[in-house]
């Protein structure tokens, strides 16, 4: 029997827009200053992870330790660098098909929410001109637990007035897929099956898809 889906929850980085490149540049600039080698491969470990947890990984890579106060100062420095990059973000950096997919789904009665660990979500949405596409925005200013904890998604479902099991999560990170499952939600992976083996279905991006395609694929996967 096919499930009744009513809510769509979207991660931000890597699903709606590629701000990961700006995160990498900001972390790289900080790591260079600290004399810690940091590569694009290392950056993959930071996907879907909170700012402080990301910095802990960088310190681990460099075999370094710091006081909590020093860590917080470095995280603030990284964020300041990142925000400067975000100020240059353009509307055409929104991934192809995102606006069409979301507008179509909303016309068909689906409620939409953002579920992102980023504390800069509002600035990013405003720069992309898509704030009005969300019924609820849950980000790092509203929740404290980082993915794979499901808090960001369960809070989104609650704000939409829906049960967790009515919601589909769109994610590009392993931690995000795990968070969706911990919250009792289906996960649509954005990327490759190799990178997201536990997502119910995986698509390369939203371009060319409609919500009916997603629900059909989920039904075919046995959800």
Image (cartoon, grey):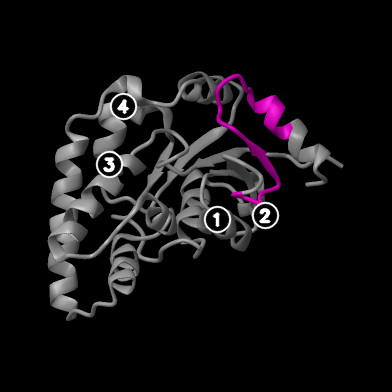
Residue 15 within the magenta-colored segment of the rendering: no
Crowding near the residue tagged with mark 3, few <14, some 14–19, many ≥20 C-alpha atoms within 10 Å:
some
Magenta stretch, overall SS: loop
Crowding near the residue tagged with mark 1, few <14, some 14–19, many ≥20 C-alpha atoms within 10 Å:
many
Q: CA distance from mark 1 to mark 2?
A: 8 Å
Q: Considering depth in this image, is 22 or 208 the residue closer to the camera?
A: 22
Residue at 68%, 39% in the rendered image: 5
* Numbered disc 1: secondary structure: helix
Between circles 2 and 3, the one closer to the viewer is 3
Badge 1 vs badge 2, beta-carbon distance below 8 Å: yes
Q: Quadrant of residue 145?
A: bottom left
Q: Quadrant of residue 61?
A: bottom left
Question: Mark number for residue 174?
Answer: 1
Q: Earlier in the sequence, mark 1 or mark 3?
A: 3
> What is the span of residues highlighted in magenta in the rendered image?
195-215
Question: Mark number for residue 128?
Answer: 4
Residue at 33%, 56% in the rendered image: 142
Badge 2 vs badge 3, beta-carbon distance below 8 Å: no
Q: Earlier in the sequence, mark 2 or mark 3?
A: 3
Residue 204 within the magenta-colored segment of the rendering: yes
- The answer to whether residue 204 is above or below residue 179 is above
Q: Earlier in the sequence, mark 1 or mark 2?
A: 1
Q: CA distance from mark 3 to mark 4?
A: 15 Å
Query: Residue 158, position in %: x, y?
Result: 50, 52
What residue sits right under mark 3 in the picture?
22
Question: Mark number for residue 198?
Answer: 2
- The answer to whether residue 61 is above or below residue 170 is below
Query: Residue 36, position in %: x, y?
Result: 23, 65
Crowding near the residue tagged with mark 2, few <14, some 14–19, many ≥20 C-alpha atoms within 10 Å:
some
Residue at 64%, 48% in the rendered image: 194
Name the image quarter holding the N terminus: top right
* Numbered disc 2: secondary structure: loop
């Amino acid at each position: 029997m096919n499930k009744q889906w009513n809510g769509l929850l979207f991660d931000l980085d890597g699903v709606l827009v590629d701000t990961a490149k700006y995160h990498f540049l900001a972390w790289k600039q900080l790591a260079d200053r600290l004399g810690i080698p940091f590569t694009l491969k290392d950056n993959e470990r930071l996907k879907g992870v909170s700012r402080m947890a990301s910095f802990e990984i960088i310190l681990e890579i460099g075999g370094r330790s710091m006081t909590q106060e020093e860590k917080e100062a470095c995280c603030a420095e990284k964020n300041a660098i990142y925000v400067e990059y975000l100020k240059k973000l353009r509307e055409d950096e929104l991934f192809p098909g995102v606006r069409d997919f979301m507008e179509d789904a909303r016309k068909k009665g689906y409620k939409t929410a953002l579920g992102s660990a980023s504390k800069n979500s509002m600035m990013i949405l405003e720069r992309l001109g898509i704030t009005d596409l969300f019924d609820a925005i849950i980000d790092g200013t509203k929740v404290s637990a980082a993915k794979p904890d499901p808090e960001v998604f369960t809070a989104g479902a609650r704000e939409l007035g829906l049960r967790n099991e009515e919601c589909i999560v769109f994610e590009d990170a392993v931690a995000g897929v795990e968070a969706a499952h911990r919250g009792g939600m289906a996960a649509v992976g954005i990327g490759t099956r190799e990178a997201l083996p536990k997502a119910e279905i995986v698509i390369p991006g939203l371009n060319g898809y409609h919500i009916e395609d997603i629900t059909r694929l989920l039904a075919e996967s046995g959800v």
